[in-house]
Structure formats: C-alpha cells, structure tokens
Amino acid sequence: MPWTWLAAAFVIAFAATALLTGVVLRLLRRYAVLDRPGARSSHAAPTPRGGGLAVLAVLLPAWAAIGLAWPGAGAGGAALAGVLPGALLLAAVSWIDDLRGLDPRLRLAAHALAVGIGLAAMAPAPVFQGLLPPWLDRLAAGLAWLWFVNLFNFMDGIDGLAASETACLGGGLALIALVAGLGGGTAPLGLTLAAAALGFLLWNRPPAKLFLGDVGSVPLGYVTGWLLLDAAAAGAWAAALILPAYYLADATLTLVDRARRGESVTEAHAEHFYQRAVRAGRSHGQVVLMVLAANAALIALALGAERGERLAGLIGAAAVVVLLLRRLSRPLRRGA
C-alpha cells in the first residue's frame, strides 16, 4: 500500500473514532451506563463505560475494507473472515456483561468460541516455528490467544492505559511489518488499530471522561492477539513476544501470585503492578507515561530483533519489563 494511502487510513480512523466517541459518550450519559467506583476501583466518581462501541464501530469496518483490498494475502485476507465475526460475538457478549453482568463461565465460553472461530480461519503456518506438532501448535496458539483476550481485559484498570497500549501494539506491529516485509495487510491493520485507539485516547486520557468497558477491552484484546499470532506465524515471533511483554508479565505474574495464595483468579481485584503504583500515590498519568516509555523501548528492541538481533532483543525486553515492574512496585517518595 502506498504511504499516502496508509496516512489517509490512519487519519480517517483517528478522526472518525474521536468524533464517534463524543457521540457515544452523550448516549452513555443519557442512559446512565456508568462504572460506579467500588473497593477495587481506581476511580472515585461514576464514569460512563462502553466507549469501546465507538472504537469497534470504526475499526471493524475499516478492517473489513482492508481485507477486501488484500484477498487471500496474509493478515489482510481470508483470515479476517473468521476474526471479524469473532470480534462481533465478543462485542455483543461483553456489552451484555457491561449492562447487567454475566456468569464468568459464560464469558469464558464465548471467548473460547471466538478464538475457535478465528483459529479455524487462520492459515496453517505454525505459530511456534515448527517446534510443536501441527495439532499441538494450534492448541497452544488458541490457549495463548484466549489468555491474551482475558489479560487485556484485566489490564484495563486505569485511565488511558489500555488505549495507549493498543496504540503501541498496533503501531509497533505496523512498523515491524514495514521493516521486516511481512506483507499482506499487517501494516494497514496495525495502523488503523493504533489510530482508533488514539482517537479514543483523546477522551480516555487522565482524567478519563469515559471507559472502554468490556465491550471495548475484550474485542480489542482479541483482534490484537490475532495480529500478534499472525506476525509470529509469518516469522516475526520475537517481535510478537517483545511488543506485549509488559502486559504479559504484569497480568501473568499477578494471576500466578493470586493462585499461589489460594485466591480466586476470576474475581475482580486491584493487585496488578500498575494498580499498586496508583495506590502508592502515583497518578494515572504518571503510570501511563512510565508504561509508554517502556513500550517505546520494547518497540525499538522488537525492530532490532527482526533485523537479526533476536537474542539481544529478547534479553533487552526482559530487562525493560523487570525495571518497569520494580519501578511500579516501588513506594513513592515524597516529592517524586
């Protein structure tokens, strides 16, 4: 795709999401679709939730158009025939969950069904680089995708974090696609994902005027997870590990720690590293800026990995994440 078309797609997706989010915000306020603060919340006042409706209303049609432009070509082609219905299924189920709550088992079943639909449409290329038998490769990819959908939802807990992470992942994958020559529609898909996230971020940046809600975070985790798996299957497996390294580490370590203590891994809580940083006195904006700085380093390391320095990139990513988690866990000193 020519650079002019990529730029146009980015600008249109950004502007459309920013405008539509304002419309959705008014509707959420009118019908009192609010996230009310509780003991585990990181906000103090009732705030509209469901802003993900605006993001998906722009992103999914944009992706459908990109898929039509690249029939059968990698991430831009036939695989979208499974991913888009899966995203719509998750949006519908998650919207019901936002409005009145659903049994966690029903939510997980919907997530698994959407992942199954997406896997059935994916190309047969191995995600784990031939290290596993084909059936086990597909099973492991499905479990990883299912976990990513849920961790993305878990990590949507403070103003601006999920939207900025989505923008970094989408933009990072687009950059990797252009540099590594992944082909297909990965670059425009990633760019439009980043643009839609940034358009929403105008309203969600601290202090947030509205939240994504599950209707936003769950489908965004789903489509982003698919892009990462597709990049790994195309050979950019190191970048697919490096780019989401902070999210993977924070959510996974927190879950393992809760399981170790015998606590429920499905109940809402406020024990993630980013939530501890807020409880320690850091503002939402400060935490998001810390994560953005780490993500910038991860994008640079992913680029290096796909240019031949994979071991150095992976080691560097581990160091970046460890330093970020330690900083998020550190008590805030007076004047800091």
Image: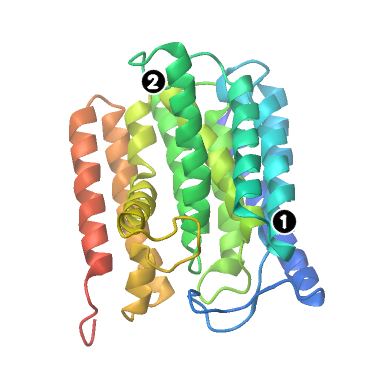
What secondary structure is marked by label 2? loop
Whole-percent x, y for residue 309 in the image: 21, 28
Q: Quadrant of residue 48?
A: bottom right
**What residue is shown at x 77% (from left), y 72% (from top)?**
26
- The circle on residue 281 is none
SS assignment at label 1: helix
- Quadrant (top left/top right/bottom left/bottom right) for the C terminus: bottom left
> In this orientation, which residue lies closer to the viewer: 89 or 293?
89
Depth-wise, is mark 1 or mark 2 nearer the camera?
A: 1
Q: Residues within 10 Å of mark 1 (few under 14, many from 20)?
A: many
Tell me if 230 is positioned left or right of 4 in this view. left
| Left or right for 183, reference 327 | right
Q: Number of marks in the image?
A: 2
* Quarter of image, res 17: bottom right
- 95 lies left or right of 308: right
Q: Position of residue 278 (x, y in %)?
A: 37, 75
Q: Where is residue 321 shown, x and y percent of the image?
A: 26, 51
Q: Which residue is mark 2?
A: 235
The amino acid type found where label 1 is placed reads Trp
- Mark 2 residue crowding within 10 angstroms, few (<14) / some (14–19) / many (20+): some
Q: Quadrant of the N terminus?
A: top right
Can see residue 170? no
Q: Nearer the viewer, residue 193 or 96?
A: 96
Residue 11 in the image, given as x and y percentages of width and height: 63, 48
Nearer-the-camera pick, 331 or 252: 252
Q: Which residue is mark 1?
A: 95
Colouring convention used in this rendered image of the protein:
rainbow
Looking at the image, tell me whether mark 1 or mark 2 is earlier in sequence order.
Answer: 1
- Seen from this angle, which residue lies furthest front? 262
Q: For the point 42% across and 41% down, which residue is it?
A: 172
Image position of 327 with respect to 238: above or below: below
Q: Amino acid at mark 2?
A: Gly
